[in-house]
Image (cartoon, rainbow, N blue to C red):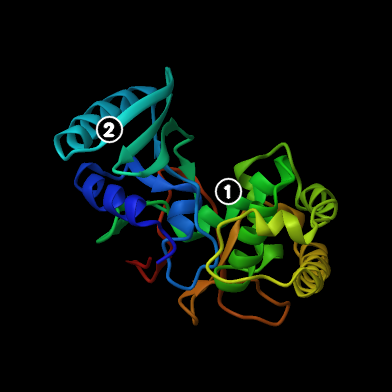
Amino acid sequence: MPLTPLQSAIVGLLAQNRSPDSYLAGGAALHIQPQSKRYSNDLDYFHDSEQRVAQAFAQDRALLEKNGFALQIDISQPGYVRVVVRKGKEATKVEWAHDSAWRFLPTLQSATAGYVLHPIDLAINKVLALVGRDEPRDYLDVLHTHAAILPLGAQCWAAAGKDPGFTPVSLLEMLRRRGKYQPEDFSRLHLSQPVEPTQLKKTWLDALAEATAFVQSRPPAEIGCLYYSESGDRFVQPTETDENIVPHFGRPGGVLPRIVGLAHP
């Protein structure tokens, strides 16, 4: 899996301290999947309150030090702690942070990491990250989530619900400014395999065109939702002819879609 040996050891150790409101998120949670191409530079643990950040860091620090890890605190403030964790010659950044409890789906229990943010929410967070900063790593991540989790148009449609300051159209306008990277921008990233900038750009432009057509086809009253296929039992980017599609809106803590009274992940 695209975690370094040190990151894997830390994630496995800290799994016992995780809970639905203290979970692995960010790039590490996204790239813990074996099909991912990018290694994350750090580990991000999100929490639903500033108090939980302090509690979780104290518990994790004690557990890490008990198991021979050395911690160097770079930043410590209410709701955010950044630490460099070392063992032997290896080191990685680990962050404990407060993040909004508003999400589309509940966090998922993980045999590897304890609890992780749901892949759908990870994908939507990455779209918002790329809108806010022009980073090649976020560009690669959004291309990955577009192919592996949910098409870009459906992500932008839902992202406007997580950040109501945007509309799906304004998000796409910002995303059209991204993707102008040189080969050396990717060479600086820790990738599991090389990438081809020309092919990436073609995929990106196709994704933007498809996303634009999608957001233009949806009713404005549904802006900010995901779409759940009852027949497919999954979240989709529906076409106008798809049937049994249910809008799914987020809320604090997230919520599972329901079909005939039964919850589905």
- Residue 18 at x, y = what percent? 26, 44
Q: For the N terminus, which image quadrant?
A: bottom left
Residue drawn at point x = 59 percent, y = 68 percent: 150
Residue 33 is situated, as x and y percent measured from the top left of the image, at 43, 67
Q: Circle 1 is placed at which residue position?
A: 125
When the figure is inspected, residue 120 is found, relative to residue 244, above or below; the finding is: above
Q: How many marks?
A: 2
169 to 239, vertically: above or below: above
Q: Disc 2 residue type?
A: Ala
Numbered disc 1: secondary structure:
helix
- Which of the two labelled residues, at mark 2 and mark 1, occupies the earlier sequence position? 2
The 10 Å Cα crowd at callout 1, few under 14, some 14 to 19, many 20 or more, is many
Which kind of residue does numbered mark 1 sit on? Answer: Asn
Place residue 88 in its image quadrant: top left
Q: Residue at x 79, y 53 (%)?
A: 175
Q: Residue furthest top?
A: 77
Work out whether 110 lies above or below 61: below
Is residue 222 among the parts visible in the rendering?
no
Q: Which residue is mark 2?
A: 70
Q: Nearer the viewer's eye, disc 2 or disc 1?
A: 2
C-alpha distance separating marks 2 and 1: 30 Å
Q: Give the residue furthest to the front.
A: 89
Give the quarter of the figure containing the C terminus.
Answer: bottom left
